[in-house]
Image (tube, helix red, strand yellow):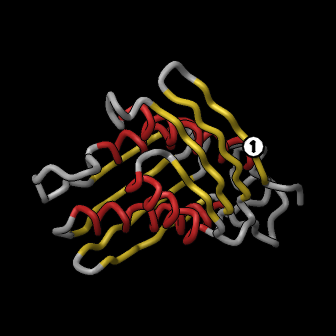
Amino acid sequence: MRDRKVSLERRTTETKIVLDINLDGKGKFKIDTGIPFLDHLLSAFAKHGKFDLKLKAKGDVQVDEHHTVEDTGIALGGSFLKALSKKEGIRRFGYAYVPMDEALVLVVVDISGRSYLNFNVQFPQKKREKFNPQLLEEFMRSFANESRVTLHVNLLYGKNNHHIMEAIFKALGLALEQATRIDPRARDVPSTKGKL
């Protein structure tokens, strides 16, 4: 099996993102996006997905956090697409239910080659937070588009925005770990089409 490690750099007039990822890691991470809560979410993603992730982002957060969050999703999604290459031997499908206190989230992923996002989440707390939870949908859309996966994110119930957001990222990590895992019984692409 070839190494599933990728180094990637993305530069725009709004952001500069450098990342290294190993899909077959141990969940080690070093993350600095300039947005502490996003760092917290990505750390949970890497830890529970067992992905080694080193990520440094510098963006125009003085304007808004939107560009950094969206471009981080783009870069991370692109790194998954590149690391998976022809997708031979992967399990392809993955899902995870993750509770965090009163919140319960379900994330389901299909490494299908078709970008699609169903983000079925309503954040119940309306108070202004340090991190805007509405940016999560932008991150997930960017990730799904660049990684070319079908991604369903569902909040089953919950009251606390922090708990909901953290459960989403933990569940995404677990679902992707399952979907990207190599199946020892398979050598080909997991599709009747022969290509994903």
Please name the residue shown 52% across and 36% down the image: 58
Query: Which class describes the residues within 10 Å of circle 1: few (<14), some (14-19), or many (20+)?
Result: some
Most extreme residue toward the left, as rendered? 126
Q: Judge left or right: residue 36 versus residue 192.
A: left
Quick one: which residue is furthest to the front in this view? 62
Q: Is residue 45 left or right of residue 60?
A: right
Residue 69 locus on image (x, y percent) = 42, 40
Q: Position of residue 148 (x, y in %)?
A: 57, 40
**Which of these two is toward me, 155 or 114?**
155
Compared across the picture, whether 89 is left or right of 42 comes to right
Q: In the image, what residue occupies the spot 19% across and 55% down?
A: 123
The residue that label 1 is drawn on is 7
Whether 151 is drawn above or below 100: the answer is above
The residue lying at 46 percent from left, 45 percent from top is 34
Viewer-closest of 11 and 184 = 11
Q: Amino acid at mark 1?
A: Ser
Name the one closer to the observer, 67 or 88.
Answer: 67
Q: Residue furthest bottom?
A: 101
Placement of 129 over or under 174, stated as above or below: above
Image quadrant where residue 68 sits: top left
Q: Is residue 55 left or right of residue 14?
A: right
Viewport quadrant of the N terminus? bottom right
Residue 122: quadrant of the picture: bottom left
Furthest residue in direction right, as rendered: 1
Kindly state the secondary structure of the residue where label 1 is placed. strand
Number of residue marks: 1
Above/below status of 164 relative to 18 = below
Q: Residue at 51% of width from left, 41% of height from top?
A: 72
Which quadrant is the C terminus positioned in? Answer: top right
Q: Position of residue 63 (x, y in %)?
A: 32, 28
